[in-house]
């Protein structure tokens, strides 16, 4: 029933759009991480004026569908005259940067939660030991806390990476030709949704499966010290991705 | 800012969103329990099939699953019956979301079933219960309690995933806001209003799930 020759025919066309999907995922993760690190520190801070806005941001982002966030930025911002006349308009008019901005802000909330959870799990004794050694706050963070937290956060972050790759498919809703967008275009050419979307699904599956295999290798490399992954498991169970 | 007629349309969309969520929750839960049980109890072929199913849904974007179900079933039904059949967006959406929900819920139920102490199923068989009766009357009620936190999270995710159905034209909350945004030319305010409605829905779902958790854990340390 499946037309395999048609699948072979659309395959190169779909593969050509994979770099777009990769570029989007990479830039979203990068932006997300840049915002997430200060956000995580703020969410863990003792001062309420830092903690409350950070946790509020995370709560709001987690409560709204990411597709709505994409529409809010891509279609919403253009409503305002001052946005259209600002220097940023060439960027905010471009669906590519809008998607990265929307999903990057979205990913930042989830990533911040992972990092904040990992930071909280670094044993208190280590902080006391660092203080006893005369390390400053910054030195303690850079030499003790971050290396530990990084490895503890890795399994949960791996999940975030896979989810981000999958989330890039939202690009197709704002006219971008990522893998899903290319598939939609191919469907309107061939009128064969089954074959085309199945082929696209297979490509996505290959990307996410090999990516998660690769990430697990990295994880094993860096966390040989964490026997049985006890710390990492605690971070992962504490951080519930929604 | 937004005329009152549009509010009605927006709230109607919210109602459709809730409807899609509840319907997918029901079907997806049944599917999830089946998948979870298959991964533990079933013979090799069914177990591998369940594992493959989860792996595929986890590895493919939700949008692709939704497109595949929606356009795929239109083509399949048209070929089968010979006349063009336009598949109902609600049905296709619920079906696709249930499939996705079932895959993730399956893993949660599997973990929960495995956490029920072995002695429970041994005691059930010692009492002469059949395996099905033991599963439904002894294992499931206990596993349910363990599964609830993860299950609650999936429910919130599902609520947000319903927005993806807008791509196949079902007028749920997001689609309704897009229509209103086009009519009023005030997309930012309309989408912001939709965001507030979504926030209210997810917050009340979170709150409700907490109540359920307290209820099912009553009498337990």
Image: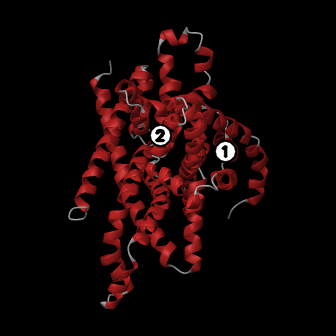
* Precedes in sequence: disc 1 or disc 2: 2
Indicate whether A229 appears above or below A188.
Answer: below
Residue B28: give its label. Answer: none
Q: In the picture, residue B52 is in which quadrant?
A: bottom right
Residue A78 horizontal side relative to residue A56, left or right: right
**Residue at screen point 30% across, 29% down:** B7
Percent x, y of residue B211: 24, 52
**Residue at screen point 33% across, 46% down:** B18
Indicate whether A153 appears above or below A56.
Answer: below
Question: Which one is in front, A14 or A67?
Answer: A67
Question: Which one is in front, A242 or B218?
Answer: B218
Q: In the picture, residue A103 is in which quadrant?
A: top right
Residue that numbered label 1 is attached to: A183
Counting other residues with Cα less than 10 Å from the Cα at mark 1, is it few (<14), some (14-19), or many (20 or more)?
many
Indicate whether A33 appears above or below B186.
Answer: below
Is residue B139 something one can see in this rendering? yes
Residue A128: give its label. Answer: 2
Distance from disc 1 to disc 2, alpha carbons, whole Å, reads: 56 Å
* Callouts 1 and 2 in the same chain: yes
Is mark 1 in CB contact (under 8 Å) with mark 2?
A: no
Q: Chain of mark 1?
A: A
Q: Which quadrant: the N terminus of chain B?
A: top left
Q: Chain of mark 2?
A: A
Indicate whether B47 appears above or below A189.
Answer: below
**Residue at screen point 44% across, 62% down:** B108
Label 1: which secondary element: helix
Label 2: which secondary element: helix
Residue B131 horizontal side relative to residue A10, left or right: left
Colour treatment of the image: secondary structure
């Amino acid at each position: 029933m499946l037309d395999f020759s048609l699948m072979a025919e659309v395959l190169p066309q779909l593969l050509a759009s994979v770099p777009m999907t990769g570029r989007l995922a990479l830039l979203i993760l990068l932006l997300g991480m840049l915002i997430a690190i200060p956000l995580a520190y703020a969410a863990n801070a003792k001062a309420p004026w830092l903690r409350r806005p950070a946790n509020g941001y995370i709560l709001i982002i987690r409560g709204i569908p990411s597709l709505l966030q994409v529409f809010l930025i891509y279609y919403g911002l253009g409503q305002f005259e001052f946005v259209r006349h600002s220097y940023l308009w060439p960027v905010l008019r471009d669906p590519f940067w809008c998607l990265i901005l929307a999903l990057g802000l979205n990913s930042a909330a989830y990533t911040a939660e992972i990092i904040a959870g990992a930071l909280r799990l670094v044993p208190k004794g280590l902080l006391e030991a660092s203080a006893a050694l005369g390390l400053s706050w910054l030195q303690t963070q850079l030499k003790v806390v971050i290396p530990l937290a990084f490895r503890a956060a890795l399994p949960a972050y791996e999940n975030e990476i896979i989810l981000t790759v999958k989330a890039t498919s939202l690009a197709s809703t704002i006219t971008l030709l990522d893998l899903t967008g290319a598939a939609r275009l191919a469907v309107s050419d061939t009128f064969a949704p089954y074959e085309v979307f199945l082929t696209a699904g297979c490509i996505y599956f290959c990307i996410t499966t090999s990516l998660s295999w690769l990430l697990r290798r990295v994880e094993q490399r860096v966390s040989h010290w964490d026997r049985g992954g006890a710390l990492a498991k605690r971070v992962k169970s504490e951080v519930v991705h929604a | 800012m937004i005329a009152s007629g549009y509010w009605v349309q927006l709230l109607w969309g919210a109602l459709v969103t809730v409807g899609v969520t509840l319907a997918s929750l029901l079907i997806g839960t049944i599917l999830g329990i089946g998948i979870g049980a298959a991964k533990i109890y079933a013979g090799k072929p069914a177990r591998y099939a369940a594992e493959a199913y989860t792996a595929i849904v986890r590895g493919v974007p939700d949008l692709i699953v939704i497109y595949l179900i929606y356009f795929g079933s239109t083509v399949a039904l048209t070929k089968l019956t010979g006349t063009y059949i336009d598949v109902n967006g609600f049905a296709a959406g619920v079906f696709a979301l249930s499939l996705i929900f079932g895959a993730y819920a399956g893993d949660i139920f599997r973990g929960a079933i495995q956490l029920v102490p072995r002695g429970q199923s041994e005691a059930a068989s010692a009492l002469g219960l059949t395996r099905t009766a033991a599963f439904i009357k002894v294992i499931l009620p206990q596993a349910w309690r363990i599964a609830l936190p993860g299950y609650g999270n999936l429910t919130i995710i599902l609520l947000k995933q319903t927005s993806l159905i807008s791509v196949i034209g079902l007028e749920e909350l997001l689609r309704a806001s897009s229509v209103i945004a086009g009519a009023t030319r005030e997309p930012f305010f309309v989408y912001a209003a939709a965001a507030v409605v979504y926030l209210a829905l997810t917050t009340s779902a979170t709150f409700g799930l907490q109540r359920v958790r307290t209820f099912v854990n009553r009498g337990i340390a």
